[in-house]
Image (spheres, rainbow, N blue to C red):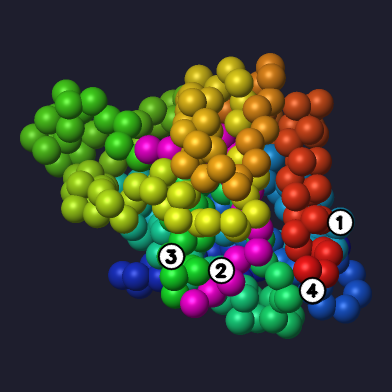
């Protein structure tokens, strides 16, 4: 496997930093983009394992950190809390759609791929659904989508939280792994409320039509309830739904990653199978 890093310019002088993984040999004919979720990053837990497994199937694989995800030069810890505070959902959707475009055009991979797939986890799964719609509306072609434990709704805050948010200008989310209180700026809430229709994941999912979409969710997920997956499935009957039980939000993977397990193996194998059918075959 060949691994390279890349940097793309983002708004406000920020940068999107990522990794390109390639199989040895001629340029791959397919590529997969991998999107992390809230409090996630490209090197978290199962992401490198997933990327390397997909490369073994012959895909070029692009993973990256959203520009304001809070990760800086230390790629394993949240050291840019001021950036985390400025992040918005619309920004993440635009950044992911932009990465998809650069992959499709061959700017991030050795040659323009014939087919492109997308994977997103948790909030990144919801962002992936929205970016898939935005990318295709803009004339791009996406050939397959997989969402892991994806949210069906971003507006998960209580009225009490929103009142405090507006009063204080921020609220905080606890990172249970590090004990950090991660700040969420008021811009996140304002962006969501201003663009509620465009950020409606269920509606976007329904508008994906017959795009090959595999929805995977853990039955015992306590972070994003499995009902979110069922809502997405009901919105788009063409999508496949796979519920993994017993399994939680990260399919029992941890960070630092200490190896796979039967539930994560099942999720990865379903993902590989979906991309094999839709990216590696002539249709």
163 or 175, nearer to the observer? 163
Q: Which residue is mark 4?
A: 29
Of callouts 4 and 1, the N-terminal one: 4
Viewer-nearest residue: 206 or 70: 206
Q: N-terminal of the two: label 1 or label 2?
A: 1
Are the two marked residues, 1 and 3, in contact with CB atoms closer than 8 angstroms?
no
Q: Position of residue 4 (x, y in %)?
A: 71, 69
Q: Is residue 47 left or right of residue 125?
A: right
Residue 210 position (above or below residue 221): below
**Residues under labels 1 and 3: Cα distance?**
29 Å
Question: Considering the numbered disc 4 on the image, is that residue within a helix, a strand or a loop?
Answer: loop
**Residue at image coords 50%, 20%:** 222
149 is higher (above) or lower (below) than 41? above
Distance Cα–Cα, label 4 vs label 1: 13 Å
Range of residues picked out in magenta: 139-153
Q: Residue at x 50, y 36 (%)?
A: 234
Kindly tell me whether residue 65 is visible in this rendering: no
Per the image, the residue denoted by label 1 is 56
Q: Position of residue 76 (x, y in %)?
A: 57, 45
Q: What kind of element bears circle 3?
A: helix
Q: Is 142 left, or right, of 224 in this rendering?
A: right
Q: Earlier in the sequence, mark 4 or mark 3?
A: 4
Disc 3 marks which residue? 134
In the displayed structure, 251 sits above or below 102; it is above
Q: Nearer the viewer, mark 1 or mark 2?
A: 2
Residue at far front of view: 237
Most extreme residue toward the left is: 167
Instruction: Please provide percent x and percent y for residue 240.
Output: 65, 41
Of callouts 2 and 4, the N-terminal one: 4
Instruction: Specify the label residue 100 is tagged with.
Output: 2
Of circles 3 and 2, the one toward us is 3
């Amino acid at each position: 496997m060949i691994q390279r890093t890349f940097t793309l310019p983002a708004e406000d002088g920020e940068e999107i930093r990522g990794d390109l993984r390639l199989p040895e040999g001629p340029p791959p004919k397919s590529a997969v983009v991998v999107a992390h979720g809230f409090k996630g990053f490209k090197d978290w837990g199962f992401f490198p394992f997933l990327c390397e497994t997909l490369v073994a199937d012959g895909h070029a694989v692009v993973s990256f950190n959203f520009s304001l995800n809070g990760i800086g030069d230390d790629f394993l810890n949240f050291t840019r809390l001021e950036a985390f505070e400025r992040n918005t959902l619309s920004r993440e959707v635009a950044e992911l759609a932009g990465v998809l475009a650069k992959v499709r055009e061959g700017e991030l991979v050795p040659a323009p791929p014939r087919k492109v797939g997308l994977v997103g986890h948790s909030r990144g799964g919801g962002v992936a659904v929205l970016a898939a719609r935005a990318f295709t509306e803009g004339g791009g072609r996406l050939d397959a989508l997989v969402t892991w434990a994806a949210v069906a709704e971003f507006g998960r805050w209580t009225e009490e939280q929103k009142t405090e948010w507006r009063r204080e200008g921020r609220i905080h989310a606890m990172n249970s792994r590090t004990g950090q209180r991660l700040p969420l700026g008021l811009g996140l809430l304002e962006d969501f409320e201003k663009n509620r229709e465009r950020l409606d994941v269920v509606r976007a999912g329904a508008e994906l039509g017959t795009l090959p979409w595999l929805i995977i969710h853990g039955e015992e997920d306590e972070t994003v309830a499995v009902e979110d997956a069922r809502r997405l499935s009901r919105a788009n009957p063409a999508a496949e739904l796979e519920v993994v039980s017993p399994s939680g939000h990260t399919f029992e993977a941890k960070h630092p990653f200490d190896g796979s397990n039967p539930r994560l193996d099942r999720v990865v194998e379903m993902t590989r199978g979906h991309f094999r059918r839709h990216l590696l075959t002539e249709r």
